[in-house]
Image (cartoon, helix red, strand yellow):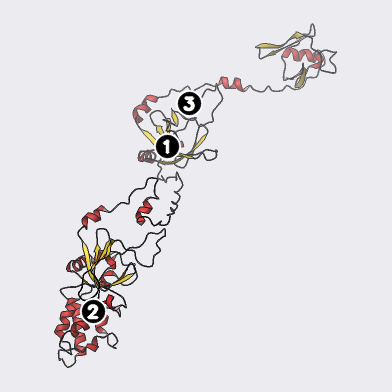
Amino acid sequence: MLHLGGGGGMLYKNWLRTLIHRHRIPLPSPDDDQFYTVYHFNLNQDVVLYSRTFRIADCDPFTRTFLQKLGVRLNPPDSVPEDPYSKLRKQPLRPYERWDTLKQFLEHDRNVLRFFCLWDDSENMSGDPRELVLHYFLADDTIEIREVVHPNSGRDAVPKFLHRSKLPKVRLEPTGWTLDMSGDSCVDTHDLMLGAVINVWGRKVLLCDCDDFTKRFYRTKYGVEDFTPVPRRPPPAPEPPRPVPPYNGFGSEEDSLCSCEGLLPKPPRRDFGKFMGLLSHVLRFVGRMVSDDPVNKERRFIISFYLSDDTISVFEPAQRNLGVLGGKFLERCRVRKPGQDVFKSEPSQYFQAWDLYVGARVCLHQHEFELLHADEYTLSYMERHAEEVRGITRDRQGPPFPVRLLLFSRTLHALFLKEMKRFFSTCDPGNMGVLPLESLRWGTSRKPLSGTLALKRDGQPVSHLATFVATQQYKWPHFNNIYVFLNYYYYCN
């Protein structure tokens, strides 16, 4: 405001308070010895008053008429910038329509949508991916977030990650800002979809999966059919193999291994089910020592295999005029198979029940034995459990267990008996009822019997058959004697 009488000026701000009181205002430097007059003011022009620049945008009609009478050519007026604060104050703080919250509460009380979320905080120095559970309450459109704290994760189990409240979509505003709690400015059900990322007060939360009730709600209301979950965590890394130290020679291998599994050594666990179920089950074989020594060839041993703990004991019965005292030859213990290093990290292979059968050769502590016979219980046990061991020995070298196992049987297989009759008829064209011994040898050109037996060259039945007929008084073995012997042997095919 310019007063013409005394040449002074007064400046007001929004008609609230006086910025510059009425007085003569000097011109800016270097003309500070002069003062502002009416000719220094014009529209759309800057005026410097005490180092402050003011823009003259427009004037009232009296000022316009007065300046025109003085011959001042006025510039076109300029628009005044709108004050954002004044504009905001003119807007209502909330819509004027009434919110009907009672109907929503009565329809959706106790209805909660549950989402399984992931907040990846790996960008921070000590951050890592954290699993969250988001609850959306349909009764009042509020959201609550809880954190899934895994055992031994190093984090405290806080009650809530986010208190139940409405979640705004916009960023956090300065202090004093009045938040618009209308439905358009807060997170709603249409914002919560699998694969969507929501802003939870500056934290990017990824919606990965939801429960069945949430799926039914979105299928009914929005027609969503694709609920493919987003993987919340990377696949677990393969467990690295634990290095096992080699056997140190103290105690058994199992005992030494248990001492490496913890600070407090524990004894190895025994299979008590196997121990109690097979406590009295013992397989006994009669064997001889494979040696070039004529004395050792005549020695006989009773080899016992205990099924309860897979141990072996060897006993030598006393024999007359042999020069060797009988007694315990090998204490009951588990016997390693030959050709293995003692001090190694891998567990040793021990003799099992399927390694012992009539005709087998086993090496027990540098002594090789050949199993000749077995008692009645051993043969019956092998016949009953032949199919159980078939799967165990299928991948081993050599023929399956029932083929290489020599069993005594009461009957002869019908197909095998038919093959023998055909073989006997071929070797005895005159139908004399006898069979030359050379026909049973493996070196002959005709091998129908050996092919039926499906044995190796060092198999026992033919040699046992020769021993059997040699004890008879017949130069030509009779068919009946051969039938008796072959009925005595039986091989499972």
Q: Where is residue 362 drawn, in percent x and y?
A: 30, 70
- Residue at horizontal 82 percent and vertical 12 percent from the top: 35
Return the x and y of residue 4 as percentages of the image width and height: 78, 8
Look at the numbered disc 3 and give the secondary structure of its residue. Answer: loop
Residue under numbered circle 3: 181
Q: Is residue 291 left or right of residue 43?
A: left
Q: Do tag 1 and tag 3 residues touch (Cβ < 8 Å)?
A: no
Dot 2: element: helix
On residue 149, the disc is 1
User: Residue most toward the bottom?
Assistant: 430
Residue 55 % position (x, y): 73, 20
Nearer to us: label 3 or label 2: 2
Please state which of residues 18 and 319 is positioned toward the viewer in this rendering: 319
Within 10 angstroms of label 2, few (less than 14), some, or many (20 or more) residues?
some
Dot 1, crowdedness within 10 Å: few (<14), some or many (≥20)?
A: some
Q: Residue at x 39, y 65 (%)?
A: 340
- Residue 54: name its quadrant: top right
Quarter of the view holding residue 391:
bottom left
Closer to the N terminus: mark 1 or mark 2? 1
Tag on residue 326?
none
* Residue topped by disc 2: 461
The three-letter code of the residue at mark 3 reads: Met
Q: Nearer the viewer, mark 1 or mark 3?
A: 1
**Location of residue 120 in the rendering, given as x and y in whole percent from the top left corner:** 50, 40
- Crowd class of label 3 (few under 14; some 14 to 19; many from 20; radius 10 Å): some
Quarter of the image containing the C terminus? bottom left
- Sequence-first disc among 3 and 2: 3
For the view shown, which residue lies furthest in the top direction?
5
Q: Residue at x 75, y 15 (%)?
A: 64
In three-dimensional space, the C-alpha distance between marks 1 and 2, rounded to whole angstroms, equals: 71 Å
* Disc with the residue nearer the chain's start (1 vs 3): 1
